[in-house]
Image (spheres, rainbow, N blue to C red):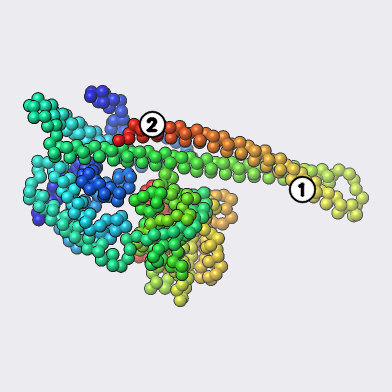
Amino acid sequence: MDVLRLKECFSKIAMHGDEVPLFFYSDLFIKHPETRELFPISMKAQREHLIGALAQIVSQVDRADELSVFLAGLGRDHRKFGALAEHYDVVGESLLETLAHFAGDTWTSELAADWKEAYGVVASVMIEAARQDEALRPAWWQGTVVSCERKAFDIAVLQVRPEPRLDFVPGQSVAIESPLRPRLWRYYSIANAPRQDGSLEFHVRLIDGGAVSMALTSGQAAGGTLRLGPPVGVLTLDTRSSRGMLMVAASTGLAPLKALTEHAASLPRPRPVHLFFCARTAEGLYDLPSLDKMASEHKWLTVVPSVSADSRFGGEKGSAPDVVMRSGTWSGHDAYLAGPTDFVREMSARLTTAGTPREQIHVEDFGWSEP
Amino acid sequence: MTMAWQDEQKRLTPDDVQSASFPLSRLGRRGYDEEHVRAFLSEVERELVTLLNEKISLWNEVERLRRRIIGGKKSGDGILFGREDAHVHAVRILSNAQLTADRYVADAQAYSHRLTEEARTRRDEILSQAQQHAEMVLEEAQARAREAALASLNAPPVPPQLEANRSALKAELAYLRTFGEVYRTHLRAYTEGMLRSIAEWERNEAGAIQQASAEAGGAFSLGAP
């Protein structure tokens, strides 16, 4: 395989931008119409993902180790989308057809052979990872929405019972697909530690124009079913540490931190936890009653609610980082932060400046910009 | 054929984007970060350039195929498309259909974004108005009640000691009665006003949704395969 030739060929083809994945999917759907139903109605985001993945694969094609980690993850991830081993062949055919189309006169039998070989490697790593994963867990879990409680104007708390039991580490999240928005998956943190009955709690904030969040917060959610992907994420409790913990949750960033607090409660020797729950207005402190209840049960837990834009609120007022930084010195604490990207970035910078070592700061970036 | 190109001339050009300027927001009001707006505009400009280039190359491709078809007819072999051409043609048709679907989804999403954003803003406005009003009513009621209490204290010269308790109670009673009265009246007026404004809002929204769905219906029937 001539790696340089492959890369050169791809960079020329990539100049055609969105046209490339557009051609690829149309070619695939014409030849194998049954594959269309594996994808959402709008393919815009899908096309960007494809080009992104292709670019990454091509750029790492000569670094097999890094690439195989990425591809194995991709292969496992595709199980919940309904991808089967036999799909890989037809995808390969359409991919080659697409590359040949855009390469035009520069397409040669040597190039075709290079691409075929490269794709063969990619597909076999993905298929193998998916096959191994199959032995461990289902591709997705069926979740029944036991209740959907509107806690604020734009926040709902869902209790979901997965079938079969879904094992996870507190602080992890799962991708959720609503039947109202087929083939659109969004990640949500599980807001509890594992329970006896296996049920999961999700805190969903309605995002303006957000397809999935709208489906999940609408009243129709209760009693219905959802599909849940496998648990992912690394915002989990560092149980080897003996330091006190600072947790700062902005809005529904509370979900993973509530799970961590429950996890902390189950440890034999609880460490002090300061949990700051920050919102714009008092109404946004949607889960304060249950936090207060936890605080009354555990001496080691201090809950501090704060708002940034609500003059009537009786408690702490100001931006979340300001409130946290004036409330104590945190350099000797493990910090856990969750919320919108901007908040996580600022909070983490403020803590670092004030002396908290970077490796003691654990973050979950919700990336709320995506609708 | 040339009509399409003439229409293009009136459309937004990359230069328009590049030279766009916006009035600054008044001091003390929230506005977008200028740098972000600039960065976004240049992204839009780049995207427009790419799109225009793509369009031109597609246009050329169409022209090339057209010439080929005409050439084929003249030479009398009667075949419009070879097998391969037919497939590429089919891919183009499906791609265009997909882009149309993408656009509809994006439009619907943008519409729902606008709608929820407006609802959120309107709700915040109503809440803060209600809060201000409630505070005002409370203040007024307190002031009037204080007046009434003072008046009843000052009114008749009363025998000392024994009457002291009675008049204090009377003052308290007058205070509470007046407070209650004023508060009730205001609350009633305010609630009625609020109901009226909600009814009006609902009417407007129903009208807008009807209009929007009529428009969308028309567009869909045109776009249907």
Does mark 1 fall on the same chain as mark 2? yes
Residue A323 position (above or below residue B68): below
Write the residue at 22% across / 48% down.
A32
The chain to which mark 1 is attached is B
Instruction: Left or right? Give the position of A219 relative to A124.
Output: right
Residue A5 visible to an observer of this rendering: no
Instruction: Left or right? Give the position of A34 relative to A335.
Output: left
Residue B75 visible to an observer of this rendering: yes
Write the residue at 30% across / 67% down.
A136
Q: Quadrant of the N terminus of chain A?
A: bottom left
In front here: B216 or B87?
Answer: B87
Q: Earlier in the sequence, mark 2 or mark 1?
A: 1
Residue A120 position (above or below residue A360): above
Instruction: Write down the residue under mark 1.
Output: B176
Write the residue at 41% across / 56% down.
A226
Write the residue at 9% across / 25% down.
B74
Instruction: Left or right? Give the position of B173 relative to B119.
Output: right
The numbered mark at residue A316 is: none
The numbered mark at residue B218 is: 2
Q: How many residues crowd mark 1 within 10 Å: few (<14), some (14–19), many (20+)?
A: some
- Residue A190 percent coordinates (x, y): 42, 61
Q: Identity of the amino acid at label 1?
A: Leu
- Residue A201 percent coordinates (x, y): 46, 61
Give the quarter of the image for residue B213.
top left
The chain to which mark 2 is attached is B
**Label 2 SS:** helix
- Residue B41 percent coordinates (x, y): 32, 37
Instruction: Left or right? Give the position of A34 relative to B33.
Output: left
Q: Identity of the amino acid at label 2?
A: Gly
**Label 1 SS:** helix
In front here: A284 or B22?
Answer: A284
